[in-house]
Amino acid sequence: MRPSRTRLINAARRAMIQRAELQRKLGIAGEALKPKSLLDRGKYRVGAVVDDTAQAARAQFKDNRLPIALAAVAGIAWLFREPIREHAPRLGRKIQDLAANVADHFRPADEDVTDEDEIEPLEEDDEAVR
């Protein structure tokens, strides 16, 4: 039995459509394997992971504000531990002097007791600070 002309035309048409589809897929695969395309996909995936991580961190901070804030303050204090060790004794003396001045201001004037006897200055102990 001889194939009819219509069948041959339809087979040729299907072959051309399949060939065009394969070439299109091959072109897409070739474009996907180019370095720029690979780099763009990598950037997109990294960006998506960073966005997801940031969203999870925001949710955790929203749910646990106090513990995270305390940990952040402790971390900052640890970073600045050396300057704190240097300046804490001077700051303590200034606060003590300020408290003595405030106490003098509010103390009644008819008292004959001197303030120096009532408020004893703190002694510095370098070993206790460290």
Image (tube, rainbow, N blue to C red):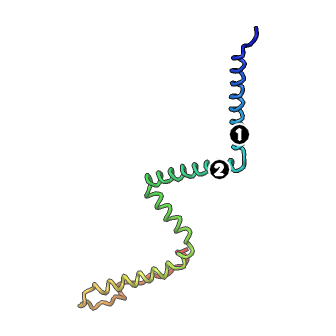
Seen as rendered, the residue at the extreme left is 110
Residue at the image position 72 percent from the left and 49 percent from the top: 35
Q: Residues within 10 Å of mark 1 (few under 14, many from 20)?
A: few
Seen as rendered, the residue at the extreme top is 1
Classify the position of the C terminus by image quarter.
bottom right
Asked if marks 1 and 2 touch (Cβ < 8 Å), the reply is: no
What residue sits right under mark 1 in the picture?
27
Residue at the image position 43 percent from the left and 52 percent from the top: 63
Q: Which x, y percent locates residue 88? A: 49, 78
What residue sits right under mark 2 in the picture?
40
Q: Which x, y percent locates residue 30? A: 72, 41
- Does residue 119 appear to the left or right of 38 in the view shown? left
Q: Which x, y percent locates residue 22? A: 71, 32
Q: Nearer the viewer, mark 1 or mark 2?
A: 1
Residue at the image position 50 percent from the left and 51 percent from the top: 55
Q: What element carries label 1?
A: helix
Q: Is mark 2 on a helix, strand or loop?
A: helix
Q: Which of marks 1 and 2 is nearer the N terminus?
A: 1
Classify the position of the N terminus by image quarter.
top right
Q: How many marks?
A: 2
Q: Which x, y percent locates residue 46? A: 61, 50
| Image vertical order of residue 65 relative to residue 103, above or below | above
Residue at the image position 72 percent from the left and 18 percent from the top: 8
Nearer-the-camera pick, 79 or 13: 13
**Marks 1/2: CA distance?**
17 Å
Going by the numbered disc 1, the residue's amino acid type is Gly
| Image vertical order of residue 115 relative to residue 87, above or below | below
- Does residue 8 appear to the left or right of 82 in the view shown? right
Q: How crowded is mark 2: few (under 14 residues within 10 Å), some or many (20 or more)?
A: few
